[in-house]
Amino acid sequence: MSRAFDEVSLASLELFCLAAEQESFTAAAHAAGLNPAAVSKAIARLEARLGVPLFVRTTRKIRLTDAGRSYWMQCRQVLNQLGEAEREITGRQQSPSGTVRISMATPYAHYRVLPRIAAFHARYPDVHVDMHLSNRNIDFVAEGYDLGIRARMQPDSGLVVRKLEDAPLVIVGSPAYLQRKGTPLTLEQLGEHDCIQFVLPSTGQPVAWMLRQYGKDLDVLTQGSSWCSEDPLGGITLARHGAGLVQTYRFIVEEDLAQGRLVEVLDAYAGRSRPFSLLYPMRRHMPQRVRVLVDFLLETAPGNLAPD
C-alpha cells in the first residue's frame, strides 16, 4: 500500500510551524536544538514536495506566503490535535490545558460571556481563552478558530450549532429624546422618528427592525440620521445620549431601563427575538480544552445560570 506522506515527516511539519511562528529559521533551529542549515533543508524539502514556496525570504527575516499561511494554519491544528490525543491516551493530562480561540458577536461577548470568563479560569486555570470580538462571519479553518458565537447563522453545513438562548428585542429611547420628539404609539408614528441604524457587515445595508402585530411577524425598514456598523453597542450609546430610538436586545439595556436612562416604547409591537448560537466545526475528536469551554458556555447559558 502506497503512503501519501512518505517524504514528509512529523518533524518537518513541526520545524515548518516553528519557523512560521518565530519568523526565523535560526530562531526555529534554536528552539528545536538544531542548526539553522538543518531547518532550512527541511523546509526546502517540504516546499519541493508541495511545489509551492511557503516563505518569502529576505536578508533580515522570513514571512509566510499566502499558501504558506494556509498550510501553517492547518498543520498547526493537526499537530495540536495529535498532541491532545496523545495526552488523553497516555493519561498524562490530568486537567485540560492549552489555548482555545473563540470569535464572538460583540453584544453577546460583553453582556453574556466576558463576565463569566473569570469563573471559567477559576475552574480550568490551564486553559487560555483567546477572544475575538467581531460581528462578521469567520472561516474557522482558514482563521484558526475553535468556536464562534453568532446571532445570525452563516451558511455552512459543516458547522455544529448549539443554541445558547433566544434573546428578546426591545425598542428604546432616552427620556430627553422622548420629551423632545414625543413617544410613538403606532407604526405610523415610528416613521416620524429618528431611528438609529445598524449596518450589517455582510450586506452593507441597515438591518430591518423586527416587530410583531396581531401575532404576525413584521420586518420594518426605518429611517434615521445616525448609522453604526461593526459594533451594535454604538447604537446604544447614541440612544442614551438622545440621538434617537434604537432596537436592541433586552439583556443589553436591562440596567438602563431599571435606572431610567432609557425607556421602552412600542411594547405593543414587541415579542420578537433572535437566537444566539455556539458554532464549531464538525469533527470526530474535539480537544479537551475546547470541550470544557463548550460545556461551560452551555451550562452557564441563560436559563441555566445560578443567580450572581
Image (cartoon, rainbow, N blue to C red):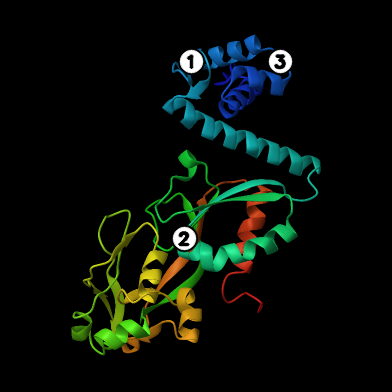
Q: Position of residue 232 (x, y in %)?
A: 39, 64
Q: Which residue is mark 1?
A: 58
Q: In the picture provided, is 30 more to the left or to the right than 157?
A: right
- Quarter of the image where the C terminus is located: bottom right
Mark 1 vs mark 2: give the one in front.
1
Q: Marks 2 and 3, Cα distance to the nearest angstrom?
A: 44 Å
* Residue identifier under label 2: 106
Of the image marks 3 and 1, the number of the one nearer the N terminus: 3
The one nearer the camera, 264 or 156, is 264
Residue 98 x, y percent position in the rendering: 68, 45
Disc 1 residue type?
Thr
Q: Which mark is residue 34?
A: 3
Binning the other alpha carbons within 10 Å of mark 3 as few (below 14), some (14 to 19) or many (20 upward) gives some
Image height check: is 68 above or below 255? above
Residue 215 visible here: no
Q: Image quarter for residue 186?
A: bottom left
Relative to residue 192, is residue 264 drawn left or right?
right
